[in-house]
Image (cartoon, rainbow, N blue to C red):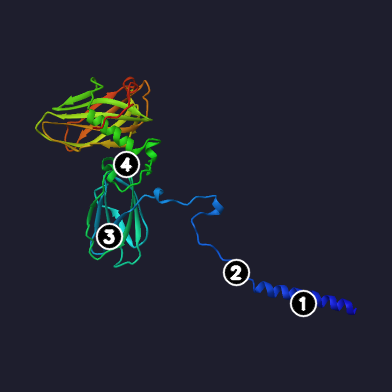
Amino acid sequence: MKQLFVMLAFIVSTFAANAQNNDTVPAVQTKPSTGDYYQGYTRPLTFNRMIPPYALEVTFDKTIHVIFPSAIRYVDLGSSDLLAAKADGTDNVLRVKAALRDFSRESNLAVITEDGAYYSFNVKYADEPVKLSVEMTDFLHDGEAVNRPNNALQVYMEELGKESPLLVKLIMQSIYKNNDREIKHIGSKRFGIQHTLKGIYTHNGLLYFHLQLKNSSNVPFNVDFITFKIIDKQVAKRTAIQEQVLWPLRAYNNLMLIGGRRTERMVFTLPKFTIPDDKMLVVELNEQNGGRHQRFSVDNADLVRARIINELKVK
């Protein structure tokens, strides 16, 4: 029995010594982060992947206006210290101001425009901002001077599918500037107003309609709206008219006023579609507060002969 007690005492003293030694073991020193996480399975973001932000100053008593080259589709504010909204009656002007006086923390602002461009801003408070009105440069025409990395990608829009918004803009500009007349038999003419279809083009699942409006009168023509819709060719009596309205995805040079003795052209982008044999596409142009409305129809035979765009000539 005495030997058993001696053995138990030895075991207890051994455990106590080990516990004391463990308490004195120094803590493991952690190394500072290098941005390389998960033992090398991920790579840190380098500065050539970053889109450099613009510097923007805001204040409480004045409003900053930022003008973009295309319609604004998305705005995100980094904190509640900022207030931002599109200017009333506009699509491409953003007004920004401070929500409270002299906020100390720097914030940020991100904007995506309809042409697929992404803009980033670092925003801080200033009592008297120097730049109250800012005009952002069109990435298409700014060349190497723009504050944008070479790897910057286009932001794609859901309604355009797989097509780049910037490429859609380039195609519309090319069609407008080349001013070719591919179609010579479709149009309407009434009351000194001539509305004609100059061409139909296609690229990557989208259709482009090139329209011309010629005002031979001295009275300006105020455009109320232009509609594209598919309707039945022949409608029996007491039968409801079936209409399918096609909404343009983009428009180039979509003027709302055609002066007297003036000719203007515009280009519309529509999703790809075909027309059944018993239906037709009708393009209607209505005058605001007037009666010089125009209307012409397009058959499926004209639509399927749309010219394929293989190269662009913008200059």
In this image, 52 relative to 226: left or right?
right
Please tell me whether mark 4 sits on a helix, a strand or a loop. loop
Q: Earlier in the sequence, mark 2 or mark 1?
A: 1
Tell me residue 20's x, y (percent).
Answer: 69, 75
In this image, 10 relative to 297: left or right?
right
Could you say which disc has been placed on residue 181 in the image?
Answer: none
Task: Please identify the residue farthest to the right as the structure is shown.
Answer: 1
Residue occupying image coordinates x 32% and y 54%: 121
Please tell me whether mark 3 sits on a helix, a strand or a loop. strand
As measured in the structure, the alpha-carbon distance from the residue carrying label 2 to the one carrying label 3 is 46 Å
Mark 4 residue type: Asp
Could you say which disc has been placed on residue 115 in the image?
Answer: 4
Image quarter (top left, top right, bottom left or bottom right) of the N terminus:
bottom right
Q: Which residue position is annotated with label 1?
A: 13
Compared to residue 106, the image places residue 147 above or below, namely above
Q: Which residue position is annotated with label 3?
A: 57
- Kindly report which numbered mark, 1 or 3, lies closer to the viewer in this rendering: 1
